[in-house]
Image (tube, helix red, strand yellow):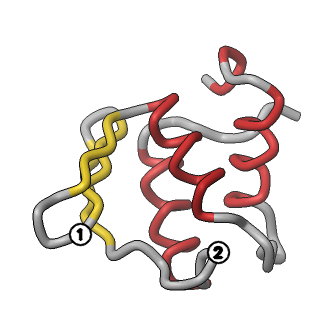
Amino acid sequence: MSSHLGENHRNTLRQITEHPKSNNVEWHDVLSLLRAVGDVTVEHNSKVKIKVGTETIVVSPPRQKTIDEDLLVELRHLLRAADYAPAN
């Protein structure tokens, strides 16, 4: 399902889903990917509501440039549940 994504989005998807985890997945790249595959809304409390397919999560944006392991795992589950996996 990721074949319609550009190279940058595919790279970000690969970083999110690879094992062992990548330590340098940048939040702005994640938001760009999520906007390409679903709906992203910043709520009044600064939380970010993400809907991909039928799956929805609400997360706090990271304070630093890169995402932490907990958010990475949450995004991995969201994307896999919506049938997004990197193309081999």
The residue furthest left is 44
Q: 44 left or right of 62?
A: left
Q: Quadrant of residue 48?
A: bottom left
Q: Residues within 10 Å of mark 1 (few under 14, many from 20)?
A: few
Q: Position of residue 42 (x, y in %)?
A: 25, 55
Furthest-top residue in this view = 4
Kindly identify the residue that appears in the image at 61 percent across and 23 percent down: 1
Circles 2 and 1: CB distance less than 8 Å?
no
Q: Quadrant of the C terminus?
A: top right
User: Could you say which is closer to the camera, residue 3 or residue 62?
Assistant: 62
Q: CA distance from mark 2 to mark 1?
A: 16 Å
Q: Identify the residue shown where x is 49% and y is 84%.
A: 63
Left or right, 9 with respect to 80, comes to right
Amino acid type, callout 2? Lys
Residue 73 vertical position relative to residue 77 in the rendered view, above or below:
below
Q: Residue at x 59, y 63 (%)?
A: 27
Quarter holding residue 69: bottom right
Residue 84 higher or lower than 21, as above or below: above
User: In x, y percent, where is residue 67?
Assistant: 60, 76
Residue 12 coordinates in the image, percent (x, y)? 73, 49
Mark identifier at residue 65: 2
Left or right of 40 on screen, residue 6: right
* Residue located 64% across and 75% down the image: 65
Mark 2 surroundings: few (<14), some (14-19) or many (≥20) residues within 10 A? few
Q: Position of residue 19 (x, y in %)?
A: 81, 70
The vertical placement of 81 against 2, above or below, is below
Residue type at numbered disc 1:
Ser
Q: Secondary structure at mark 2?
A: loop
Foreground pick, 80 / 7:
7
- The disc, 2 or 1, on the residue closer to the chain's N-terminal end is 1
Residue 46: mark in rendering: 1
Height in image: 55 above or below 87? below
